[in-house]
Amino acid sequence: MPRIRVGVQLHPQHTTYASFAGAVRQAEAIGCDSIWNWDHFFPLYGEPNGDHFEGWTLLTAMAVLTTRAEIGCLVTCNSYRNPALLSNMAKTVDHISNGRLILGLGAGWFERDYNEYGYEFGTAPDRLRALRDALPVIKQRWEVDVPPPVRNPIPILIGGGGEKVTLKLTAQYANIWHGFGPLETFTRKSAILDEWCREIGRDPASIERSVSPQEGEDIAAYVEAGATHFIFGMGEPWNFDRAEQALAWREGR
């Protein structure tokens, strides 16, 4: 029987730091295995100029606020930071958390972040090529920088469903793939990831499958499709009902 993990993604927007910190503590207290934020500079919904906090700075706080749960950005935008710098940031948070960081990575998509912070948005292929080029740099820096990571190598999660590039990069570099519903989409993308793994000679079972199910979807059906890590997103006011239901389901299965 596969080991099921349950996590939450706490949206760092339209909130205060005190409220966000309380939600982090609550997530660990109810038994969540992973706690995530996101890597953006402006709200993704609601008032577009509302309060918002930076993801990697928050990860440092999340590392200190917790003792057991794994933490990460779901996901880090590769384009916002030099890959050697990002590897060092990840290593530092890995040490602060005593080996509980997961490095979530994606190619980036939110154009406002790029425009207002002076990054080149370019095209989707441009951003995917940048991600492709960054991944080996990040892993190589973990081999030579000192001190090395506590958990070496730090697990890499890649989020996204691009069938020609993103899933191939996942097969090549990732420990975790994060997909999205509905179930039919997740199942199809997961099968394509399996094919990429076989093409490069990697065991598909070596990549954990995480997913953010849509409201009302059956967790058991996702487990049948290969998912073992469920991450439920939420903003303030924080509502942990779905995570608590998933945790109860896991204990009772």
Image (spheres, rainbow, N blue to C red):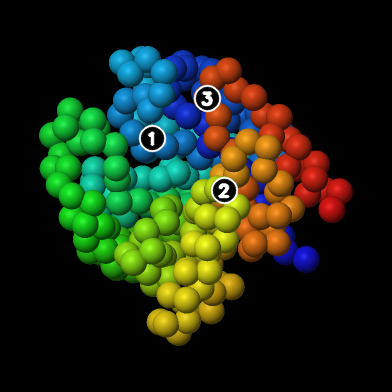
Instruction: Tell me the amino acid under the disc marked 3.
Output: Gly
Secondary structure under tag 1 reads helix
Q: Element type at marker 3?
A: loop
Q: Amino acid at mark 2?
A: Pro
What is the x, y in percent for residue 153? 44, 65
CA neighbours of label 1 inside 10 A, class few (<14), some (14 to 19), many (20+): many
Whichever of labels 1 and 2 marks the residue nearer the N terminus, that label is 1
State the residue position of label 3. 235
Q: Nearer the viewer, mark 3 or mark 1?
A: 3
Against 167, is 242 above or below? above
- Secondary structure at badge 2 equals loop
Marked residue nearer the N-terminal end (3 or 1): 1
Residue 84 seen in the figure:
no
User: Left or right: where does residue 146 sit relative to residue 232?
Assistant: left
Disc on res. 182: 2
The residue located at (42%, 37%) in the rendering is 38
Please indicate whether residue 140 sits to the left or right of residue 157 in the image: left
Residue density around tag 3, few if under 14, some if 14–19, many if 20 or more, within 10 Å: some
- The numbered mark at residue 55 is 1
